[in-house]
Image (cartoon, coloured by chain):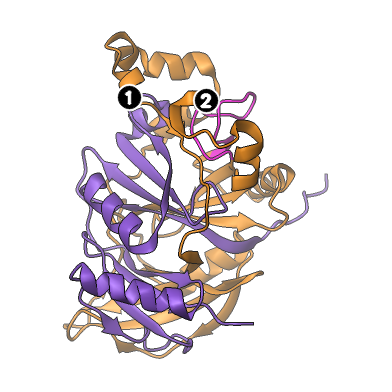
């Protein structure tokens, strides 16, 4: 019997992380990044969510159904002990500056530069924390 | 090599066996019997809302996750996910934990440079600290080809290599035979890495174009 052809990962596509307050985090991500709320999986109407005791809110960057998902576990407490950070790549210098300005307006403490000292240097980057103290790195997309 | 403790959000093998049944409508209806009877099901609907314009974000650039043993994790992501090792760096200060140190192993996918960072960390006493498992539910790697057949081939390959899938392959919609009643339309299977991080391998996710083709500019419950 021959093995099926190997299929490899092509890219990091979406990330689903825990939050303590879905509405607070939803407001934060929509206001700061202009994300669109694209779907809801609720434990009262999703069997998988009911079995895993979770509720999931999906957000899109504007092309895929979802790119970031916020999930609330209704029985367990989240922490910051399994992820150091994640990065969001921003479209163009004006948008990068707009997000920096929005972040300052809503009282985020900004940390300049990349999160990891060993990371490749990008055009511009800064970091901030979301309401659950998840670290987010904001990177300006390289121009072609 | 130490075995990573199992985080509390990892479903025990007994419960994981029910995963396959989520593709059966009768099973989903049975699980949802109580919220159906109390009518909570209809006020807390699982549904799509559609996306209609670009946001300010282009894509997710990088994710860094804590691992107990870089060598073991690197081997897993190379063998199972087909990722490519870019570089492993020397110890550096933890960016926000004073007196802690980290070592970073940068992994690339075929179309995404250094998208995943495997991070070992040492506390101020020099003790290796693993992952709690409670910061994220899972992250998803899109497979080459990005089609239903590619995810099915990936799953078949893992089974042939005796690598255990903890869920799937399923399609996150309600269409038989793979639909599990969720949203997104993506075909997916899930595996735990050596630190019990849940990794989704996916393809064929719904996009703004096929949402519009099905529902036009309708948002929310009008189409459900």
The chain ID associated with circle 1 is: A
Query: Which is more toward the observer, B4 or B167?
Result: B167
Q: How far is the residue under mark 1 from the one under mark 2?
A: 19 Å
Looking at the image, residue A34 lies above or below residue B111: above
Q: Secondary structure at mark 2?
A: helix
Q: Residue at x 65, y 25 (%)?
A: B177
Left of A144 or right of it: where is B94?
A: left
Looking at the image, residue B63 lies above or below residue A40: below
User: Does residue B94 show up?
Assistant: no
Please tell me the colour of chain A. purple
Query: Which image quadrant is residue B68 in?
Result: bottom left
Secondary structure, magenta segment, majority class: loop
Query: Which is more toward the observer, B200 or B127?
Result: B200
Looking at the image, residue B191 lies above or below residue B50: below
Left of A99 or right of it: where is A25?
A: left
Magenta stretch in the rendered image? B168-185
The chain ID associated with circle 2 is: B
Q: Would you say residue B120 sits in the magenta stretch?
A: no
Left of B53 or right of it: where is A102?
A: left
For the residue carrying disc 1, how many other residues have a C-alpha within 10 Å: few (<14), some (14-19), or many (20+)? many
The mark found on residue B223 in the picture is 2
User: Does residue A88 show up?
Assistant: yes
Please tell me the colour of chain B. orange
Place of residue B40 in the rendered image (x, y in percent of width and height, measured from the top left): 29, 18
Give the residue pinned by disc 1. A44
The mark found on residue B189 in the picture is none
The quadrant of the rendering that contains the N terminus of chain A is top right
Left of B158 or right of it: where is A19?
A: left
């Amino acid at each position: 019997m021959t093995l099926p052809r190997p299929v490899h990962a092509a890219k990091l596509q979406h990330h689903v992380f825990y939050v303590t307050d879905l509405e607070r985090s939803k407001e934060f991500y929509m206001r700061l990044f202009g994300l669109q709320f694209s779907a809801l999986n609720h434990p009262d109407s999703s069997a998988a969510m009911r079995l895993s005791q979770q509720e999931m809110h999906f957000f899109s960057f504007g092309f895929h159904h979802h790119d970031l998902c916020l999930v609330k576990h209704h029985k367990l407490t989240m922490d910051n002990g399994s992820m150091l950070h994640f990065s969001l790549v921003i479209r163009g210098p004006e948008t990068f500056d707009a997000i920096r300005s929005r972040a300052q307006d809503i009282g985020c403490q900004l940390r300049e530069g990349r999160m990891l000292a060993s990371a490749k240097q990008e055009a511009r980057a800064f970091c901030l924390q979301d309401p659950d103290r998840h670290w987010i790195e904001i990177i300006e997309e390289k121009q072609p | 090599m130490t075995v990573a403790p199992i985080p509390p959000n990892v479903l025990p093998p007994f419960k994981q066996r029910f995963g396959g049944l989520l593709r059966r409508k009768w099973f989903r209806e049975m699980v949802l019997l109580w919220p159906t009877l109390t009518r909570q099901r209809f006020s807390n609907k699982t549904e799509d809302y559609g996306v209609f314009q670009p946001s300010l974000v282009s894509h997710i650039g990088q994710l860094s996750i804590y691992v107990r043993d870089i060598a073991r994790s690197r081997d897993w992501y190379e063998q199972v996910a087909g990722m490519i090792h870019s570089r492993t760096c020397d110890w550096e200060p933890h960016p926000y934990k004073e007196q802690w140190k980290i070592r970073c192993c940068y992994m690339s996918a075929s179309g995404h440079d250094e998208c995943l960072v495997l991070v070992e960390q040492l506390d101020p006493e020099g003790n290796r600290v693993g992952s709690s498992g409670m910061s994220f539910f899972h992250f998803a790697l899109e497979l080459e080809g990005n089609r239903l057949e590619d995810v099915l081939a990936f799953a078949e390959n893992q089974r042939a290599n005796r690598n255990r899938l903890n869920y799937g392959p399923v399609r996150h919609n309600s269409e038989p035979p793979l639909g599990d009643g969720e949203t997104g339309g993506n075909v997916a299977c899930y595996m735990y890495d050596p630190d019990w991080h849940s990794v989704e391998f996916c393809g064929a996710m719904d996009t703004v174009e096929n949402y519009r083709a099905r529902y036009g500019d309708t948002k929310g419950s009008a189409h459900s």
